[in-house]
């Protein structure tokens, strides 16, 4: 079977080459062609013999993506819909955002999502599979090439639950990290989860240096289970226990995402419950107006409410900031482009 060469960490590629009778140092040369010189075919790897290039073509693909659609916001945010060329017509989305500290890409980790969050455009659309490491990495390569920029930060907040595709996401992070590949430090990578508790323990034991974000959105099990069905499997008490273990093990701050929905989770009683839940923890709260989707149940909280909510948290000693909404004119929230395309 032909395998995408970008699925392999450098050490794995060395082993793969040995299996086809080649010297392992060739892996470093191939990495340089792919990640430094950014070639798109084995034929361009001109310091490899013609024989080796043929062997590579017979055993591997190079996994390039095609851009199906690109939307650009007035604030510079760009949203990409990619054809991942897997022979099945699967499409995924990635978003490029510009902040004062550099360019950030929001990558997808799965084709669809099984978590069923009620406020998410990916809910109700067919789940296909987890993305392979090369397909995660390719999102970054394709955007860097198209936008002619160097990306400095990665957030796993696109389509999919990254911890539901744990092994492939960990492998992708290894490649993103590797100085001979994308050379983006772990501290510049953020993993966002709806709360897959056993994998949070795994991340803690691995002493992962990436930033962990928890999509919390409610402090009340009944409300949270309604918004995010994963809460029925891993309720808030279990989630918080795992978060505390993670902080203890890694000494790293956790970012709690809280999307405010009008009259749902945005009053001061909710803010007070959040204070009680996070008191004394190494935590930061990111407030965002909830993403409104077609036929969705939730509407955005007002700006005044969001500010009042933030001020209340800050007064009570919980560090909270309001995340700037980028790309709202191009529906940059995850899953919306794929959904439109599947429905058209
Ligand atoms: S918000 Fe994230 S975890 Fe929830 S359904 Fe959407 S993609 Fe999945």
Image (cartoon, rainbow, N blue to C red):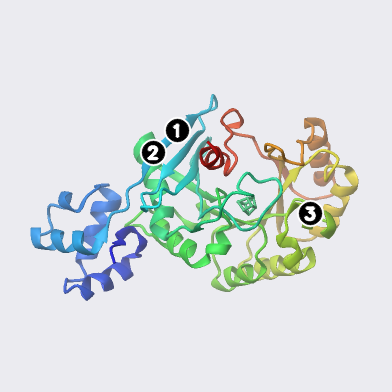
Query: Given contact means CB atoms under 8 Å apart, are the residues at marks 2 and 3 in contact?
Result: no
Q: Residue at x 32, y 70 (%)?
A: 12
Measured as percent of width and height from the top left, residue 270 is found at 86, 48
Residue 234 visible at all: no
Q: Between residues 281 and 13, which one lies in front from this camera angle?
A: 13
Drawn side of residue 6 relative to residue 29, left or right: right
The residue indicated by pointer 3 is 226
Measured as percent of width and height from the top left, residue 74 is found at 54, 24
Question: In the structure shown, which secondary structural element does the residue marked by tag 2 occupy?
Answer: strand
Question: Is 26 located above or below residue 316 in the figure?
Answer: below
The residue indicated by pointer 1 is 70
Image quadrant occupied by the N terminus: bottom left
The residue indicated by pointer 2 is 67
CA–CA distance between discs 2 and 3?
Answer: 36 Å
Q: Residue at x 41, y 37 (%)?
A: 68
Question: In the structure shown, which secondary structural element does the residue marked by tag 3 occupy?
Answer: helix
Count residues near mark 2 (Cα–Cα under 10 Å), then give few for <14, some for 14-19, many for 20+.
Answer: some
How many numbered marks have been drawn onto this rendered protein structure? Answer: 3
Question: Is 20 located above or below residue 218 in the figure?
Answer: below
Furthest-left residue in view?
Answer: 50
Query: Given contact means CB atoms under 8 Å apart, are the residues at marks 2 and 1 in contact?
Result: yes
Residue 114 visible at all: yes
Q: Residue at x 16, y 71 (%)?
A: 22
CA–CA distance between discs 1 and 3?
Answer: 33 Å
Question: Is 59 located above or below residue 83 in the figure?
Answer: below
């Amino acid at each position: 079977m032909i395998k995408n060469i970008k699925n392999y960490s450098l050490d794995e590629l060395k082993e793969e080459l040995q299996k086809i009778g080649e010297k392992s140092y060739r892996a470093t040369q191939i990495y340089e062609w792919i990640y430094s010189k950014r070639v798109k075919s084995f034929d361009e790897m001109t310091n490899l013999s013609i024989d080796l290039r043929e062997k590579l073509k017979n055993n591997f693909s190079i996994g390039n993506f095609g851009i199906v659609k690109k939307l650009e916001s007035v604030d510079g945010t760009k949203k990409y819909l990619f054809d991942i060329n897997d022979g099945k017509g699967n499409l995924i989305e990635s978003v490029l955002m510009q902040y004062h500290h550099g360019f950030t890409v929001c990558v997808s980790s799965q084709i669809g999502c099984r978590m069923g969050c009620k406020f998410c455009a990916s809910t109700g659309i067919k789940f296909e599979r987890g993305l392979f490491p090369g397909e995660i990495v390719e999102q970054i390569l394709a955007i860097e090439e198209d936008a002619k920029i160097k990306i400095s930060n990665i957030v796993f907040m696109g389509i999919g639950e990254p911890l539901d595709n744990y092994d492939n996401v960990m492998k992708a992070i290894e490649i993103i990290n590797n100085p001979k590949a994308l050379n983006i430090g772990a501290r510049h990578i953020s993993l966002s989860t709806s709360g897959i508790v056993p994998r949070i323990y795994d991340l803690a034991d691995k002493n992962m240096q990436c930033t962990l974000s928890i999509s919390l959105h409610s402090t009340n099990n009944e409300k949270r289970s309604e918004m995010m069905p994963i809460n029925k499997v891993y309720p808030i008490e279990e989630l918080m226990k795992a978060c505390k273990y993670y902080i203890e093990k890694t000494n790293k701050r956790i970012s709690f995402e809280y999307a405010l929905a009008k009259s749902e989770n945005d009053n001061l009683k909710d803010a007070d419950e959040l204070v009680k839940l996070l008191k004394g923890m190494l935590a930061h709260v990111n407030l965002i107006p909830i993403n409104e989707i077609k036929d969705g149940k939730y509407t955005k909280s007002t700006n005044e409410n969001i500010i009042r909510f933030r001020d209340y948290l800050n007064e009570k000693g919980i560090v909270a900031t309001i995340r700037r909404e980028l790309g709202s004119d191009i529906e940059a929230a995850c899953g919306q482009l794929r959904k439109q395309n599947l429905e058209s």
